[in-house]
Amino acid sequence: MPQSATGRKITTSHWVERQGYEEIEGLDCLVWISKRPNYCDRGNFWAQVDVKSGGNAARLNLDAADAWPRYYMNLDRAKLEIEEWMKKRRQWIDA
């Protein structure tokens, strides 16, 4: 199971597989990852974040510096980084 530099493991039970993408729900957000076409050289996967219905956009506090969408070469690494971003932003929901 992939780990971060701090030894954290990906919490796969939080990720939900949908048709063509995977998503994880935060307190105020929904983050989803999908595969990009083979000709894309920016990354094999891209992640988007949306304020979920009933979520507090102000508490999420996204701005241009947050750089969404984000591009990743490796799906496991993408999930790990997104989970750590969610924890840092206080968006993590314990199962």
Image (cartoon, rainbow, N blue to C red):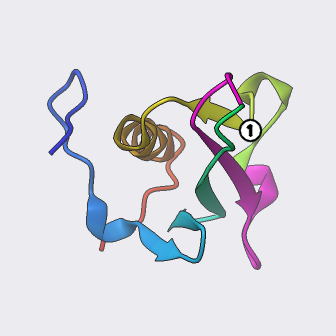
Which residue is found at the position 36% from the left and 40% from the top? 80
Judged left or right of residue 90, residue 11 is: left
Judged left or right of residue 61, residue 12 is: left
User: Does residue 82 belong to the magenta stretch?
Assistant: no
Q: Which residues are magenta?
A: 40-59
Mark 1: amino acid = Pro
Would residue 25 be visible to someone looking at this image? no
User: Does residue 58 belong to the magenta stretch?
Assistant: yes
**Which image quarter: residue 63?**
top right
Question: Which residue, given by chain and number where applicable, does mark 1 sit on?
Answer: 69
Total residue callouts: 1
**Residue 93 percent location from the top left of the image:** 41, 66
Quarter of the N terminus within the rendering: top left
**Where 18 sits versus 93, above or below?**
below
Nearer to the camera, 26 or 22: 22
Instruction: Rate crowding at label 1 as few (under 14), some (14 to 19) or many (20 or more) other CA atoms within 10 Å.
Output: few
**Residue 23 percent location from the top left of the image:** 54, 65
**Where 40 sits versus 59, above or below?**
above
The outermost residue toward the right is 64
The outermost residue toward the front is 39
**Residue 70 percent location from the top left of the image:** 66, 34
Would residue 14 be visible to someone looking at this image? yes
**Which image quarter: residue 92?**
bottom left
**Residue 10 percent location from the top left of the image:** 26, 49
Which residue is found at the position 49% from the left and 49% from the top? 90
**Where 42 sits versus 31, above or below?**
above
Which residue is found at the position 74% from the left and 28% from the top? 67
Quarter of the C terminus within the rendering: bottom left
Judged left or right of residue 80, residue 85 is: right
**Where 28 sits versus 95, above or below?**
above
